[in-house]
Structures are given as structure tokens and as C-alpha cells.
Image (tube, rainbow, N blue to C red):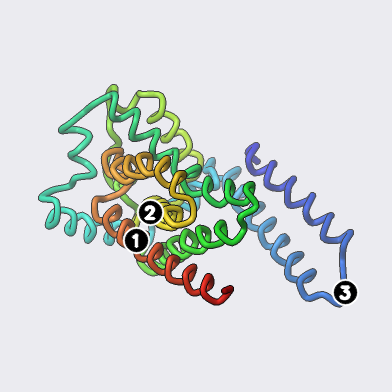
Amino acid sequence: MRPVDRLVAAYLIFTTILILLRWEFSSPESFLLLGMHVLVGLLIYLFTKTGEQDNYSTGRVLREQRELSSTFDRDTVIQGWDAAVFGGQISFDWIRNSPSVFWSGVLHLAYLLYYPIVLAGPALLLLRREAVRARNVLFATILAFVVCYVVFALYPVAGPNYSFEQPTGPVREVWSARLVYGILGTGSSFGTAFPSSHVAAAVAANVLLWREWRALALIILAPTILLVVGTVYCQMHYGIDATTGFAIGAAAGWVGLSVARRQEVARI
């Protein structure tokens, strides 16, 4: 069992003990939570046992099971769309035809900034005791996520990080690139390339923050633009992934704005 598996198992044991200590026989939620913990624990056990017998990690087992499906056939379709729209495989060609250690470092860093871009708005708004505004930003962001995840479930696409050879040379060795690939190597989600949820969620958060806290929106605008570009330049997403993710994020932001306005009117 790997350290990460032991850590998750320890967390499950801890939270299961809490559930049992606070058990309420009259509450269906108690049975549901306990059942969920048991199932997750069983999954960890099965995958780690598989890893011990076949010298495979949990992430690799999951990845290879999914590779048995037609995921890469769908990649071929998306690659065809990229060729039609961009005149070639932009996610493969861009970093190789225009190699830049500086821009590789900046854009890989922007890819990592996805987490603070998405989380900063709601977290800081809550610290300012503006829960309604935080919820508005969260609604649009989660809506973008949900739309992307529905597409992932119905049409899983591996993405250029798995279907193409990874870049080599100085652009790959810059510290931020090594960090990105190190994180992805620990168990990145496979089959979740189209559309780019990174782009969709970041754009949706920006749209709502432009209404709820414009100063913060202006601060994260540049990192968001770099993120959109970086997902393609750094070969994490196809060009179509990024453009479709942008459209979903903009649409989710528009819906979020509409909901926020209606709720504001209702409170008056």
C-alpha cells in the first residue's frame, strides 16, 4: 500500500469512527455515510491488492482499464476537429514550433494557478462576510464543472497529454513544467480532456467576480488568460477543448449572472 493509500485509509478510518460515535438510528444519513465509507475503503483495498500482485499502481490500473475502451478513438475525432479549425494539431505543434523556456515556465505556472483562480473568489468573499456574493460565484463555477463532467461521462477524451508524446528539452525541464508533470503523474484524471474544465471553471468564476468583486476579477484576469493559452501550449488540452471550455464557462457565467440578478430583485 502506497503512502497516499495509507493516508486516505487513515482518513476513512478516522471519519468512520466519528460517524459511529455520532450514530443516529433514526437518521438515514448515518447509514448512507457509513455505506459510502465502506465502499470507498473496499475500492482502495481492491486497487492496492491489484497493485501488489501486478506491480501496478492504483492510478495505472484505472488508466489501463479505461484505455481498453474507445477513449482514444474519440481523441482521433477531436484531433480531426483541431485540424479543421486550427490547420493542424496545435496542442502538439505549438510548443515544438515556438519553444520558449520563459513562456513554458509562465504558462505551466498559469496551469497550476487554476486552483487559486477558482477558489480565491468564494474564499475571500466569505472572509469579507459576503456569503451571498460567494454563493453566486460558486454557483456559476460549479455549473461549469457539472456541464463538463456530464460531457466527460458521455464522451471521455484522453487528451494530448496521453495521446501524443510529451515535449522534451528545456521547455519540459523548466521547474513549473516538472511540477505539473509530477502532479499529473501521481494520478491525473484520465478521459477528462474535452471540454477543458480548467478553462470553463476559471472563465465562469471570472464572469461572476466581475459583478461581485471587480477588483479581484481584474487581479485574476491575466492569470486566467494565461491559463486558457497554457492548457494548449503546454499540451494539456486540444485547441477544441480550450475553446469549448471557454464557451461553457461564458455560458455558465451568464446563467450565474441571471440567477444572481433574480435573487437580488427577490430580496428587495
Q: Are marks 1 and 2 in contact (CB under 8 Å)?
A: yes
Residue 191 seen in this snapshot? no
- Pick whichever of labels 3 and 2 is earlier in the sequence: 3
Residue 266 sits in quarter: bottom right
Amino acid type indicated by mark 2: Val
Q: Separation of disc 1 and disc 2 at Cα?
A: 6 Å
Q: Separation of disc 3 and disc 2 at Cα?
A: 44 Å
Q: Is residue 261 above or below residue 250?
A: below
Which mark, by number, is residue 203?
A: 2
Please state if 27 lies on the left or on the right of 250 as rendered.
right
- Mark 2 is surrounded, within 10 Å at the Cα level, by few (under 14), some (14 to 19) or many (20 or more) other residues, namely many
Q: Where is residue 131 in the image (x, y as percent from the top left)?
A: 62, 58
Instruction: Give the secondary structure at mark 2.
Output: helix
- Pick whichever of labels 1 and 3 is earlier in the sequence: 3
| Residue at mark 3 | 25
- Mark 3 is surrounded, within 10 Å at the Cα level, by few (under 14), some (14 to 19) or many (20 or more) other residues, namely few
- Count numbered badges in the picture: 3
